[in-house]
């Protein structure tokens, strides 16, 4: 009787080779990652957060919560995004505002004074005496 060269009970050398090659490929991809892709200490976001906190504690900027209430009294709409950025000589709050018509506009405020530095988009300021709509309860 002739024995078949393939036995269902014996482990396949072909399968072992595939697993080995796959393991090598995964390992080489991990080793090939660029050095700057691996975190090397505090992230940029963390450093920015620490700089902003230090500026607030030193009195160089006003708290965002103070400016948000002023902005929502002055402009129609809700602030949907806020960023604090350091320009060459000053800190700026960049605020995205969503008015009732749905056309987002952006205002940049001096973070120390709250003064309007510039705006982009269809800015909608409130008229004198115009009240703010009530915010829904959460």
Image (cartoon, rainbow, N blue to C red):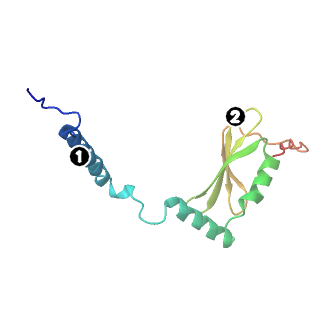
Along the viewing direction, whichever of 81 and 42 lies nearer the viewer: 42
- Residue at (59%, 63%) from the top-left corner? 49
Q: Are marks 1 and 2 in contact (CB under 8 Å)?
A: no
Q: Name which of mark 1 and mark 2 comes first in the sequence.
A: 1
Q: Position of residue 103 (x, y in %)?
A: 69, 34
Q: Position of residue 120 (x, y in %)?
A: 65, 42
Along the viewing direction, whichever of 17 and 124 lies nearer the viewer: 17
- For the N terminus, the image quarter is top left
Residue at numbered disc 2: 103
- Circle 1: is it few (<14), some (14-19), or many (20+) Cα within 10 Å? few
Task: Give the answer, above or below, for where 107 lies relative to 57.
Answer: above
How many labels, in total?
2
Direction from residue 56 to residue 100 in the image, left or right: right
- Residue at (19%, 33%) from the top-left corner? 7
Residue at numbered disc 1: 20
Residue occupying the far right of the picture? 129
């Amino acid at each position: 009787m002739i024995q078949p060269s393939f036995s269902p009970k014996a482990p396949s050398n072909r399968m072992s080779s595939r697993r080995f090659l796959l393991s090598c490929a995964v390992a080489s991809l991990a080793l090939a990652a660029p050095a700057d892709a691996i975190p090397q200490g505090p992230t940029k976001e963390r450093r920015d957060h620490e700089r902003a906190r230090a500026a607030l504690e030193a009195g160089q900027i006003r708290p965002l919560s103070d400016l948000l209430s002023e902005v929502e009294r002055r402009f129609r709409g809700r602030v949907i995004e806020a960023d604090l950025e350091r320009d060459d000589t000053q800190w700026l709050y960049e605020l995205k505002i969503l008015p009732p018509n749905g056309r987002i506009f952006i205002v940049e405020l001096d973070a120390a004074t709250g003064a309007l530095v510039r705006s982009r988009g269809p800015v909608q300021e409130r008229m004198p005496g115009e009240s703010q709509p009530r915010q829904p309860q959460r």
